[in-house]
Image (cartoon, rainbow, N blue to C red):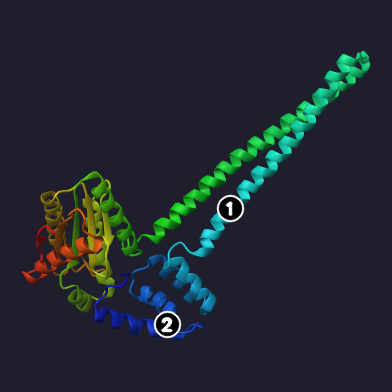
Amino acid sequence: MRYRDSPEHTAECLRLALPLMAKQDSAMHPISFSIWYEHVAGMNAPLSSELERAMQTELALDEEATYALYRKYIAGLDEQSAQQVADGFRRVLSDLSDSANQAGKQASRFGSVLEEWSEGLLDGKSEKSLAEEAAGIIGDTRQMQDAVAVLNARLDSSKDEIERLQSEIVRAREEALSDGLTGLANRRGFDQSLADRMREATEQASELSLLLLDIDHFKNVNDKYGHLFGDKVIRSIAQVLKDNVKGRDTAARYGGEEFAVILPDTPPMGARAVAEKIRSTVANCRIQRVGNNETVDTISISIGVAHFTGGESPTDLIGRADSALYTSKSHGRNRVTVAARG
């Protein structure tokens, strides 16, 4: 589920998005709303950058532009990007084929000339005639060398182009799986990573733990200090997660103010230790407001920990971690709860 914001935050985003949508040339449908919702919610920085550039030019978005933005920044690696990459590979292969055909034709002509010259030697041609044919062979040899040099140059160029296209695919995939505000994995990236790690844990009979984290009283933070400061809090906690994950661990923004951490090869006690370190680090942070350097009230998080039990589904594991998180919330917040084994 991509959107896990509170009803109050959703209502605020709706209030901010509707006036912006009304200024566009596209209809006010769900695709258009998703774009402007993610913009005003501050959850998709690349999309917001493009929308802000468009607003500066005072050009209204039509249907085509609206759908293009949706495919590019929300739907993931869109059809146009995939088509561009496919066209690039086809172009490289076509160039290689043309160069190889040209070199092949040149080699065929060269072989025919050598065969004719060999027959001339056997037929006892005159020295003058053989000398003329030898000069021709030398010329054909140079042409053959040139053709091979062109082919080699094309191969080098094609190698560079293929590497560029591969990098483009990796970049597009990473963007599709990343949260724009924090740089952590987004919900899609989390779902994919969790499925992969659970499969590995099952196949290798290895440990796997999951943390679910939620910012305590986040609505109060937004109401008291504003959504821009709320975004700063989210980014700060995301940085704490980045500083405390390593190797194949995955930190993700699970929802509006919720986060998740996947810990492969980590038993329950180890996962609890990581969770406590993250909790205490956040509790000791002092985040300042932009502009006046005012230090705000202490920010805290609650955490639920669940250890993977072979045979359970991702939904089951997430559910147990979520139940543990709810326990932390209901018992005073700013604490870690480890779920019972499934």
Q: Is residue 247 above or below residue 322?
A: above
> Relative to residue 235, is residue 159 drawn left or right?
right
Helix, strand or loop for disc 1 = helix
Classify mark 1: residues with Cα within 10 Å, few (<14), some (14-19) or many (20+).
some
Which residue is denoted by mark 1 in the rendering? Answer: 88
Q: Residue at x 17, y 76 (%)?
A: 220
Residue 271 location, x and y as percent? Answer: 15, 52
The kind of residue on which mark 1 rests is: Gly
Q: Residue at x 16, y 63 (%)?
A: 320
Residue 161 location, x and y as percent? Answer: 56, 46
Q: Quadrant of residue 3?
A: bottom left
Residue 18 location, x and y as percent? Answer: 39, 85
- The C terminus lies in which quarter of the figure? bottom left
Q: Is residue 35 above or below residue 108?
A: below
Residue 303 location, x and y as percent? Answer: 14, 62
> Relative to residue 89, is residue 19 drawn left or right?
left
